[in-house]
Amino acid sequence: MNAKRKWYTKPLLGLGLLLGATFAGFPILWMIANSLKPNSEIFAWPPVWISPNSSLEPYLAVFQDPAKMRFFFNSYLVSTIVVIVTLAISILAAYAFSRFDFPGKMVINALIIAIQAVPPITLLIPYMALVVALRLYNTYTALVLTYLLFTLPYAILMMTGYMNTLPKDLDEAVMIDGGSRFRALWNVLVPTALPGIVAVGMFTFMRAWNEYLFALTLTRTNEMRTVPVGISLLMGQHAYQWNQMLAMSVIGSLPVLLLFLFFQRYFIAGMTAGSVKT
Amino acid sequence: MRDAVAQRQPRFARLGPVLKHGTPYAYLSPTLLLIILLLVVPIFLVIKYSFYDNVIINKNPVWVGLENFRIILRDSRFHTAVRNTLIFVSVSVVGHLVLGLSFALLLNNRVFSARTTGIFRVVYVLPWMFTGAVIAILWQMMLNPNGIVNYLLSVTGLSDAKIAWLSSRKYALGAVTFMNIWAGYPFFMVSILAGLQGISEDLYEAAAIDGANAVQQFFRITIPQLKPILISLLTLDFVWTIFQFDLIWITTGGGPLYATETLSTYIYKQAFSRFQYSQASVAAVLVLIACTVIAIFYARQQVARD
């Protein structure tokens, strides 16, 4: 096919690629450029493409504001706990799915797949009632608990897929030597499955970090709120502090962006886990 | 006597068969417990709420049968929300598919080096990395009357009016739909790209020998080969888009004048601004029924592929 390629294929394809990159990337670049500008220049007409007055001042303002830093602390805390709990539970569940045949396996598996199609907002009203009844309103526990329903299905499916690729001889060798099943899982399977665990962990972190609806509804005070809610609240409070809102958006996106750039391969594997079977 | 015999055996030996069958369930028990607490109980509750007068606010709610369903089904705002949701979802899903497929095809080329395409792939995935609140702020800035979008339209001579995209009844729904397409296409792109790379080269070579041109190859080989992935993607995206909440809530809050009111903003307002929890539950139950049908379809399709 390469030999018969027409002369215009390459420039046309290159143009297409560049147009696509502009569509995807320009809004992000514009956000970063504006986050460095003084407020008065953000909606200048004609636009100030790169401002000579650019500075890191909006970023410093965010970092020096303890209320805003609290959003970051909350997000890191909640996301980290969600990752740990999700990993622990999904490793156990994946072990059951990957190493046993048992009555009800198909049904439970189908149920876990189907949970992915349950819209969060339909559960929000009963969650609110349950969280209030359990005296968990406006607590980290409420967020961690409710996030689990949406991180676990994906984590279990992906982890099971990964464990299925590991030979059964690995854990059976431990058990022949007299070790328990749990030791086989903990000492042999978990270390071997580490790449898969890292992938699931990052994906879970991203989900938890980006969650908005439950964080908005199940918390009340700014001390308990997470970054996405914090950013959206800035819109109301400082309607004119655009550069600070944008700076906070950039800072708030960095953890996920960095994870993505460093572990791209895992991310792609994670994104496609739900819909593509290899 | 029997006890004495049993005691001479190692402890739990009698439990052997039970344990053997129980083991997988033991490993699954945290998952099952959470499914019951976080899925089964809440779904039961939300269905129950829909048949009572105002729950949560009212300490002793009274059974009112289908009264709430009558109220909701006659509410013109609910009709608007359903209509807007259908427009928002169908345009978004088609947009995701078209952009995702086009970008995946662009990236799946042999013309440029793997390194070059790799860089483009990273750029193309970027919109998917941002949380809804950031995308909302980002596009609110772009779509401001004095924003860059209006500037580019005026420079290129397409429109000189400084359109307030998100606060105009005429354009707001289109604007949030566009934002949602921008934010969501990478999920399609990456999945389709993985699918494209799984299609055997032999198929194309055989088609080329038979004289099929690029367009014929696309419709006769690429699309049929991608079909299972596309069905999964469309199903999942359909459900996810029904409940896109963040973008709409932060940019327009369902306004102006319900122009962008969708089922998610409708349910949220009914519950958490108007405190009509029972009526909100009715809307939630109606959508849950729709999504359950889709979910069963999806799960059956996924299990069949395993």
Image (spheres, grey):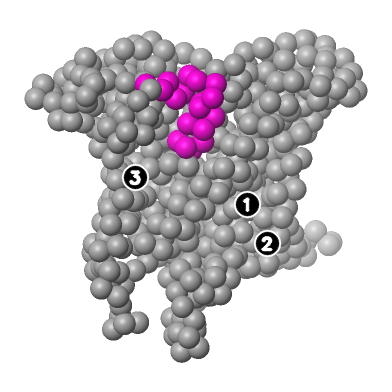
Left or right of residue B21: residue B223: left
- Identify the residue at image location x=63%, y=52%: B235
From the top left corner, tell me how far across and down residue A255 is, in percent.
31, 38
Residue at (65% x, 41% y) in the render: A118
Identify the residue at image location x=78%, y=10%. Answer: B59
Q: Position of residue A266 (x, y in %)?
A: 38, 57
Which of the two marks, 1 or 3, is nearer to us in this view? 3
Is A239 placed left or right of B84 in the picture? left
Query: Disc 1 versus disc 3: distance between alpha carbons?
Result: 24 Å
What is the chain letter for disc 2?
B
Q: Amino acid at mark 3?
A: Ala
Q: Is residue B174 visible?
A: yes
Q: Are marks 2 and 1 in contact (CB under 8 Å)?
A: yes
Name the residue that disc number 1 marks. B235
In the depicted structure, whether residue B144 falls above or below residue A238: below
Q: Name which residue type carries label 2.
A: Gln
The magenta segment is B162-180
Q: Secondary structure at mark 3?
A: helix
* Quadrant in the picture for residue A142: top right
Marks 2 and 1 sit apart, C-alpha to C-alpha, by 10 Å
